[in-house]
Amino acid sequence: TQLLEQSPQFLSIQEGENLTVYCNSSSVFSSLQWYRQEPGEGPVLLVTVVTGGEVKKLKRLTFQFGDARKDSSLHITAAQPGDTGLYLCAGARYKLSFGAGTTVTVRA
Amino acid sequence: DAMVIQNPRYQVTQFGKPVTLSCSQTLNHNVMYWYQQKSSQAPKLLFHYYDKDFNNEADTPDNFQSRRPNTSFCFLDIRSPGLGDAAMYLCATSSGASDPYEQYFGPGTRLTVT
């Protein structure tokens, strides 16, 4: 059983469109991280959110941590082909647990 | 630049032939992790070292072993690889301080078993 559920599993959009990826759990996390993984490479940490209700922005990427610290979302504005990759959320309790990931493809 | 390095990037081994994957880090982090990742799946933690203390996940097969001779290096040994062990193997590090457990990954080793 996956502790963290990510949706959608796959997402294909046109360059310039917006997208949102969701990460949900019934468990409370002390922090939550988002990683991006490109084919054949290891995951790269994008952001860590710690406080319930926290919103962090990283250029065109907006990350939100739910008030109850059980869920998170990643929103990308005006997606570019360089945003293509596998997006993984990971929740921290006494260790890090990964979601199954969302594969995002941005078509030029 | 401080980083996590994995060698080789691609490894082909025969069914049942022992193989060793290596990981080194220049971040001087206390914790080193080994993950197995199969296609379109989440990374699965196999074990980790906190300094010299080894922590095995309950569902990690005995076929997988690890060594950490010093702070910088960590090895993953697969004693008798089966076809089901073909996967990407990721090494990661973290500072070891309490939460948020931010982890820094190497580029991975893609293991093929023939």
Image (cartoon, coloured by chain):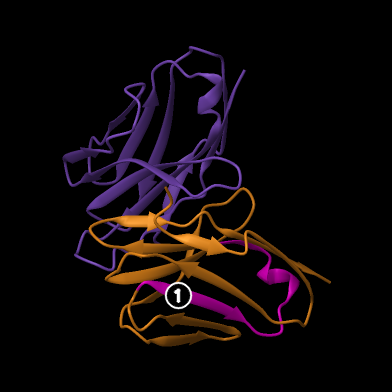
Chain colours: A orange, B purple
* Vertical order, A100 against A35 (above or below): above
Residue A85 is inside the magenta segment:
yes
- Give x and y (percent) for residue A83: 66, 70
Q: Where does the magenta region start and end?
A: A70-87
- Give x and y (percent) for residue A94: 22, 58
In the rendered image, the residue lying farthest to the right is A108
Residue at 35%, 34% in the rendered image: B75
SS at mark 1 in the image? strand
Residue at 62%, 17% in the rendered image: B114
Residue at 50%, 57% in the rendered image: A43
Kindly indicate the quadrant of the structure image that contains residue B70: top left
Residue A34 is inside the magenta segment:
no
Q: Is residue A37 visible?
A: yes
For the image, the number of numbered tags is 1
Which chain is mark 1 on?
A
**Amino acid type, callout 1:** Ser
Left or right, B112 with reference to B75: right
In the rendered image, the residue lying farthest to the front is A26
Residue at 39%, 56% in the rendered image: A3
- Give x and y (percent) for residue A107: 81, 68
- Please tell me which residue lies in front, B8 or B42: B42
Kindly indicate the quadrant of the structure image that contains residue A84: bottom right
* Vertical order, B69 against B97 (above or below): above
- Please tell me which residue lies in front, A55 or B20: A55
Q: Where the C terminus of chain A falls, by quadrant? A: bottom right
> What is the crowding at mark 1: few (fewer than 14 residues within 10 Å), some, or many (at least 20)?
many
- Give x and y (percent) for residue B74: 32, 38
Q: Which residue is mark 1?
A: A72
Q: Is residue B26 visible?
A: no
Left or right, B105 with reference to B12: left
